[in-house]
Amino acid sequence: MSILSVKNVNQYYGGSHILRDVSLEAQLGKVTVLLGRNGVGKTTLLKSLMGLVPIKTGSIAFDGKPIERTTPYERARAGIGFVPQGREIFARLTVEENLRMGLAYKSGSTPIPAELFELFPVLKQMLHRRGGDLSGGQQQQLAIARALAPKPKLLILDEPTEGIQPSIIKDIGRVIRMLADRGDMAILLVEQYYDFAEELADEYLVMERGVFIARGPGSEMQEKGIRQLVAI
Ligand SMILES: Nc1ncnc2c1ncn2[C@@H]1O[C@H](COP(=O)(O)OP(=O)(O)OP(=O)(O)O)[C@@H](O)[C@H]1O
């Protein structure tokens, strides 16, 4: 089932036309991978989906309802989790407090789901450490756990492997696959690390200067030469 439906979205920064008639779907139980070189508009698209930048035209439906005029807060509450590029961990707050921030719009008594510590055991060991004292990989796991805390139906990740050591990349890949395979969450992943993207992709999209130039099932990425298309 399609939980996210984006149709003909156009977005501008000043006079620059960044997103041009962008349309895409994200399905429950599937990982949709968005590839593209630097500066083509991937992050801008994710920010548009979250309501962090306004779109000029087009529609965004989530769970059957239009959301393009709603605030980021309302989109988060509707069930969209966002892991931003660069992680944006609160450096002076503890791991536990960072996780609670993910629950900020739930009622005050909502506990941190114990499952997050099964997905990322390191966070349990580090519960009372400050976010800023964690390694980059640990911070990335914290950012993902924070986004998962309110149990979103759509998880959006912006380059989760950027600057992360290989063993943690593997762990993150396993978690993403497992979350999708449960069938009750859609995952939209922007990724520059091609092998990671290909391994996880149920569907892929390739963006170039604000438009999708290729798309299809992940199983066809090799035969369609997608690696060459996004090689730097
Ligand atoms: N706040 C802004 N104001 C003006 N132009 C911007 C702004 N943010 C991004 N841009 C421009 O919009 C274009 C798309 O940027 P965007 O960050 O979405 O690309 P990207 O594909 O995510 O690249 P990267 O992988 O480097 O993050 C780029 O040309 C960028 O310079």
Image (cartoon, rainbow, N blue to C red):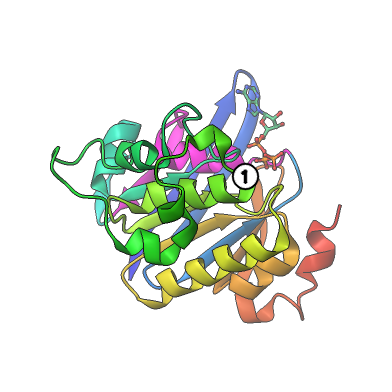
- Total labels: the figure holds 1
Residue at (52, 41) in percent of width and height:
84
In this rendering, is residue 103 above or below 119?
A: above
Q: Is residue 150 magenta?
A: no
The quarter of the rendering in which ligand 1 is drawn is top right
Image check: 25 left or right of 165?
left
Q: Secondary structure at mark 1?
A: loop
Residue 58 location (% of width, % of height)? 43, 41
Can residue 69 be seen from the camera position used here?
Answer: no
Query: Which residue is more in the foreground, 196 or 69?
Result: 196
Residue 5 location (% of width, % of height)? 39, 56
Query: Which residue is more in the foreground, 133 or 46?
Result: 133
Q: Which residue is mark 1?
A: 135
In this rendering, is residue 28 above or below 124?
A: below
Q: Is residue 46 magenta?
A: yes
Three-letter residue code for mark 1: Ser
Residue at (45, 62) in percent of width and height:
121
Image check: 34 left or right of 106?
right
Query: Which residue is more in the foreground, 187 or 13?
Result: 187
Residue at (63, 61) in percent of width and height:
168
Residue range of the region highlighted in magenta in the rendering: 39-62
Residue 202 location (% of width, % of height)? 54, 74
In this rendering, is residue 213 above or below 16?
A: below
